[in-house]
Amino acid sequence: MARLYTKDHEWIDVAGKVATVGITDYAQAQLGDVVFVDLPDPGRAVTKGGDAAVVESVKVASDVFSPVTGTIAEANQALADTPALVNEAPEGDGWFFKVEIADEADLGDLMDADAYAAYTASL
Amino acid sequence: MTSSAAPLPTVTTSETPLLTTPLAAAHRALGAKMVPFAGYLMPVQYEGILAEHLHTRAGAGLFDVSHMGQAILAGPDHATTAAALEALVPADILGLKPGAQRYTQLLDAHGGILDDLMVHRPHAGEETGDGQDGTLMLVVNAATKAADMAHIENHLPAGVTLVPVKDRALLALQGPKAVDVLARLGADVAAWPFMTAGPATVAGIAVHASRSGYTGEDGFELSVADDRVADLWAALVADPDVKPIGLGARDSLRLEAGLCLYGHDIDTTTTPVEAGLTWSIQKRRRQEGGFPGFHVIAEQIANGAPRRRVGIRPEGRAPAREGAEILSEDGLPIGTVTSGGFGPTVNGPVAMGYVAAAHAAPGTRIGLLVRGKVLPAEVVPLPFVPARFYRGT
């Protein structure tokens, strides 16, 4: 399934029941140098649009929301030691967490790559 | 993703058109991200705050600080002009030697801080060319300059006048290589000690230079005519040791250096004693007084302030930001973080805040309330990064 995007600048890759979530390249460029990421513990319940993680750059703390309701399956421990991965590879090795999706209907209102590109161009 | 804290404080509203410095086009050409700050559109970063911060500590960083307020206080002689300013600030201005500069604060009747500022006494006749010695040069904060000017003007005796300098820009060149850069551009300033100032020529351009800054590093501030600042900026930024630095790194540099940001670490609710600025009140003023809030400040110097500004090192990697509540080891509220973030040279989170005096000793274990969790932290001495000022030989 192709990558989907939220208006809050998260991306989500769905493979079966588990989705990988991160922040977009646009988001990391807005944040600047990332120095700390507060990740959710596996097993934690998250809701669509609710707080799931926090990303801190030198200047600013930002909330990261879960694009879907579900249960955290895994957090990217590489970000604990190397938060700069969020800047270097935001849509690759800099992923934040994996979530087991409770209801795939949550994906219905997310944007595809073209729609997200048009959205960021409008900001 | 959404920001829960603003990247930089601003006092701008949508109804206020933003001012620009004469260097706005130069900043854009260098790829700056521009943000509103204190009513001005200013560069917050060029290549990135981390890289700019680290470059300033290793080489030389060039800052446009033209938004700051410059003014000249002029009277018939030094004693008269100094006495006029001493009625408003707690520093010894009368004892300021020609060529010297001093840090002080405008105080209210309760000893609260209306602004902090630099005061410089030029050599006789340096500004006027007629040998007259009654001039002081002031540099105040951007956000407060209009209020400062009105406050000072309202309290001047006859014969002393305040003239805002509206046709001059201000650059800061900071870092261990700043002095070499200026020497390469022909300025004869290498022997000047920290906190001295005077006329100089940089790249053929007349400036008023001061060996001071806001980073904890050796460096200079250069006041220059608006119509020459673009040439001066271009000459400086062309030097291979120089990179342009935005307000983002200016903030992380001053935080590591333990320096106060007005409106955050100091304001009308804090006194210089609480803020740890008692060193800036010289002996004669502590004894004689004659400045606003003297009764409060003398009492705090004698008996200790009820709360103190302290350095704070959070454990781990999570920064604590301005506004975070400070708790004692047993969980009671004892104060608030006034500046906090990530220190690139420290390579970890750093903060400053006010705590009740009983908790102000370095080594005291404290907690910081961040997003509902208590972050363990410790009170530490300031600065976080040792100052490297040039004190002379």
Image: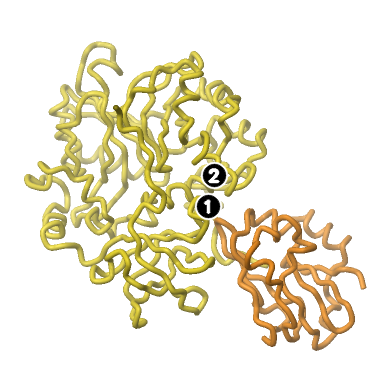
Chain colours: A orange, B yellow
Q: In this figure, which residue is indicated by the disc labeled 1?
A: B344
Q: Which residue sits at x=7%, y=47%?
A: B287
Q: Residues within 10 Å of mark 2 (few under 14, many from 20)?
A: some
User: Which labelled disc corresponds to residue B302?
Assistant: none
- Quarter holding the C terminus of chain B? top left
Corner quadrant of residue B51? top right
Q: Is residue B345 left or right of residue B378?
A: right
Q: Is residue B41 visible?
A: no
- Quarter holding the N terminus of chain B? bottom right
Secondary structure beneath dot 2 equals helix
Q: Which residue sits at x=48%, y=54%?
A: B346
User: Which labelled disc corresponds to residue B54?
Assistant: 2
Q: Position of residue B12 (x, y in %)?
A: 51, 51
- For the residues marked 1 and 2, what is the alpha-carbon distance in whole angstroms? 7 Å
The amino acid pointed to by label 1 is Pro
Q: Residue furthest left?
A: B288
Q: Is residue B109 visible?
A: yes
Residue sitting nearer the eye, B159 or A110: A110
Q: Residue furthest right?
A: A1
Marked residue chain, label 1: B
Q: Position of residue B101 (x, y in %)?
A: 28, 32
Marked residue chain, label 2: B
Q: Are marks 1 and 2 on the same chain?
A: yes
Q: Position of residue B170 (x, y in %)?
A: 45, 31
